[in-house]
């Protein structure tokens, strides 16, 4: 399956910005859309705003301005719509976030908890959930490890358990925050290839934060480059040129930070659905997020 038409928007960000306590700018007000079946890589250095943008898509980071709008549930402006959106938005984490003393199958089953009430989740889950979880392990090549404790698995296997858990949630979108940062190159390629192929097969929208250029070029349908808390590139990998890489990877420390000055605003190569909104700027983010 190839990525769906860009006209089918799954999630829309409208003038969304994030400022942390102490007037620290994490993400400049930005407008961007994410489309069904698209494998998007957020590319940039640590502190550029990748994780902040990614985690704000399901309100793990609370925006301080603007809106996140789900095509399915509407504006995420109350607990109910945020909870509904999260039930359909799975996460894959850099450090897996697995329960190491539990088996791979038990960890994958936690992806089904969003579909059950609090009291029901305290009981054994239905057989249908068990079968689904096992099928998800089959898809990532770990059916033979279903009853193995997670702490007995390699890093790459643990990340595949994380992907299986995300699939058990039956999501319309997967957010992956630096999913291969702690893996060796060969394992990283296998994990990213597996995630991309599954998302294409199932028509799942994926947004992945990475700092490795070669992986972004190889696996992404679309690259969104960030620097200095703003988007500076948004297009297909084939359109990425050296001048864009200079903007993304030569993020400059702002010598005026803390003195009321704004961070530099590099010229941008931006997809038509992405906009930056001019505003008074808090001081630039100086710590990795």
Image (cartoon, rainbow, N blue to C red):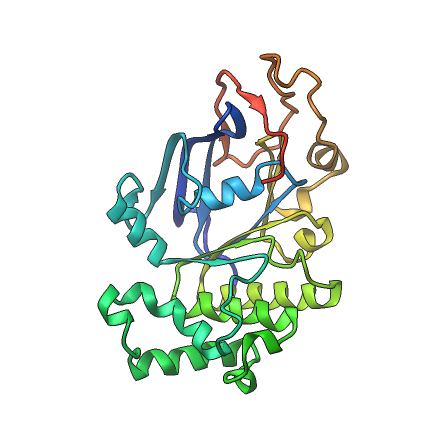
Residue 48: give x, y in percent of width and height.
Answer: 62, 36
**Picture residue at 30% right of the left edge, 52% below the top:** 83
255 or 199: nearer the viewer:
255
Q: Nearer the viewer, residue 124 or 184?
A: 124
Please identify the quadrant where the C terminus is shown: top right
The residue located at (61%, 73%) in the rendering is 157
- Pick whichever, 80 or 212, lies toward us: 80
Image position of 24 (left or right of 173): right
Residues 69 and 243: in front is 69
Q: Measured along the vertical axis of the image, is residue 216 above or below residue 289?
A: below
| Residue 278 position (above or below residue 229) | above
Tell me, yes or no, if residue 155 can be seen here: yes
- Asked whether residue 1 appears in the rendered view, the answer is no
In this rendering, position of residue 219 left or right of residue 84 = right
Residue at left offset 54%, top offset 27%: 25
Q: Quadrant of residue 250?
A: top right
């Amino acid at each position: 399956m190839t990525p769906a038409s860009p006209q089918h928007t799954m999630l829309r960000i409208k003038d969304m910005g994030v400022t942390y306590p102490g007037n620290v700018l994490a993400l400049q007000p930005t407008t961007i859309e994410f489309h069904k079946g698209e494998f998007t890589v957020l590319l940039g250095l640590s502190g550029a705003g990748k994780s902040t943008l990614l985690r704000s898509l399901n309100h793990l980071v609370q925006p301080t301005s603007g809106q996140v709008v789900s095509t399915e549930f509407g504006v995420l402006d109350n607990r109910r719509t945020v909870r509904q959106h999260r039930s359909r938005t799975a996460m894959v984490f850099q450090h897996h976030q697995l329960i190491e003393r539990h088996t791979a199958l038990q960890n994958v089953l936690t992806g089904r908890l969003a579909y059950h009430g609090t009291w029901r989740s305290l009981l054994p889950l239905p057989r249908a959930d068990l079968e689904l979880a096992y099928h998800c392990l089959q898809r990532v090549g770990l059916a033979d490890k279903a009853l193995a404790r997670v702490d007995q698995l390699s890093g790459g296997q643990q990340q595949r358990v994380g992907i299986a858990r995300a699939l058990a949630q039956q999501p319309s979108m997967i957010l992956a925050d630096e999913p291969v940062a702690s893996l060796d190159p060969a394992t990283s390629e296998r994990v990213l290839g597996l995630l991309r192929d599954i998302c294409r097969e199932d028509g799942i929208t994926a947004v992945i934060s990475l700092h490795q250029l070669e992986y972004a070029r190889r696996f992404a349908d679309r690259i969104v480059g960030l620097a200095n808390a703003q988007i500076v590139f948004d297009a297909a990998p084939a359109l990425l040129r050296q001048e864009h890489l200079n903007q993304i990877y030569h993020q400059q420390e702002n010598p005026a930070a803390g003195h009321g000055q704004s961070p530099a605003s590099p010229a941008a190569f931006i997809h038509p659905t992405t906009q930056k909104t001019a505003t008074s700027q808090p001081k630039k983010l100086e710590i990795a997020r």
